[in-house]
Image: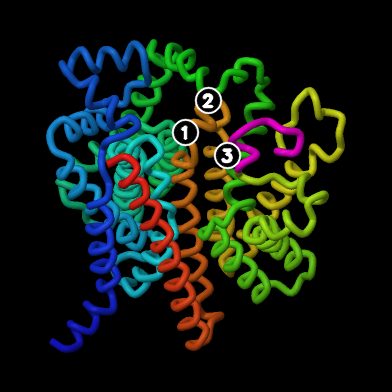
Amino acid sequence: MNKIREMYYKWYSGLLLLLLYYIIIHLFMNSSFGDDIRYKNYWQDYREWIKYLYQNWTIRPLPDTISALILNYNIWIWRILNIIILVSIPYLINLIIFGHKYKQYINYIISLWLLYPLTHQSTAGWVVTTVYYIWGIFFGLYCILILKKIIFREHIQLYHYIFGIFAIAYTTSSEQNAVIFILILLSTGIYGFRNKIGIKYIMILFIITLCNILIYMLSPGKANRYIIEHQWFIDYSMLTLPDKIHRGFIEITTNLFMNVNLLNIVLCLFVFYSVWVLNKNKLIRTMAAIPLMIQILFGIFHEQLNSWFPEVMKYIPNMTSYYNGFSQYSGIITFDNYFQITTYIPLIIMIISCCFLTISIYYSFSSKIVGISASLLYAIGIILTTAIGLSPTLYASSHRTHTLLYIIIIMIISLMYYYNEYMFTVKQKKSIKYILLFIAYFSLFIQTILIIELFEKFH
């Protein structure tokens, strides 16, 4: 009995503390701003409302319907369900990566999950944003868990299959999730076919994903929404395709490397240490060190460098300059600064950071197959997030569109720790645990203050 209690405390105490934290902060989350108000006002007749979305906006039947129902019935339903989903996400990640036998890693994943800036989910209203992004991630992870069980020929209960169909229909309502699931389902389907594993269920999930993509692409609301969204980016129609990709890439990489992005800092630290231990090649070690150096210099100490070296730092981008305008030194290439060499410095820094980190992730694993998979996963996350530049809502959507990339980063760090755990001494493992906890508590403190400020502002 004592051993059971000890294991329970060791494995699940983190989940209980996470549950308690989310219960407290949800008391300060309301539905009095952003899209939450719009969904309340528009919900009159369900059929007319869905018809309006189909003709004038992008229709996402499941998230839109659930958001509207909750907002027009009782916000406590959302609070309860959102708390359950937020607590379940690290547990699902643990099951996907490690399985049931390795519950000792759950607290590390929880620490990483707490580094995710939850305040990003308030940018369009707490309810609508979390129901679309966070719940979409949850259902996506659930589908991946089912696919993993199929590939490993594990027994799956019937209710998992049934709920998996709902989950794939929900998660692929997001264009980002739909693209990544097309790739996942194609790869698992091919693997299953070659290894004589039944793929009928995988084909059903693939068809549902394709249907969601077709609904999005063919609905008349897509074109109408595109016109409406120009109010958030007046000059968007004048941009070429390379301009749009450039802005999308700069927006995501700036958030990662030119800001105090705790998850990306932890990723860079793990990559650098793993590469340093596993590889003696000086070029590879230098490549792994550069993203970390850029993160520290231009992310953590950006403001200090601005005050010490203002003439130099005006060529280096920061978050404010990107979001608020298109000045000469914001890293955006325009007709006015096209011929100025200094204009290209931010883009070069971002490309170097992103490419070197992607390559270094490969060298961070003793298993080359896992290294290739992790590098591809990170690259796909960057590409899908960059694709937001193809929409006029690039800046209006803010950082909530980066949620999928954050989940990918958490999974890569977890994999890296698992495969490279043998490199750490017992003392180093304890140090990693306490450092992660310290960073997580710091993140919680900042996020809690911001959430309370939002509550006071819109209460």
Q: Residue 117: image x %, image y %?
A: 43, 53
From the viewer's perspective, is the residue at label 2 or at label 3 nearer? 2
Left or right: 323, with 153 as reference point: right
Residue at image position (15%, 16%) is 45
Query: Does 20 appear in magenta?
Result: no
Q: Which of marks 1 and 2 is nearer the N terminus?
A: 2
Q: What residue type is labelled 3?
A: Ile
Q: Which amino acid does label 1 sit on?
A: Ser
Mark linked to residue 397:
1
95, above or below 73, in the image? below
Q: Which of marks 3 and 1 is nearer the N terminus?
A: 3
146, above or below 16, in the image? above
Residue under pointer 2: 391
Residue at image position (55%, 32%) is 387
Residue under pointer 3: 383
Q: Is mark 1 on a helix, strand or loop?
A: loop
Is disc 1 in contact with disc 2, using a CB cutoff of under 8 Å? yes
Q: Is mark 3 on a helix, strand or loop?
A: helix
Magenta-highlighted residues: 320-330
From the viewer's perspective, is the residue at label 3 or at label 1 nearer? 1
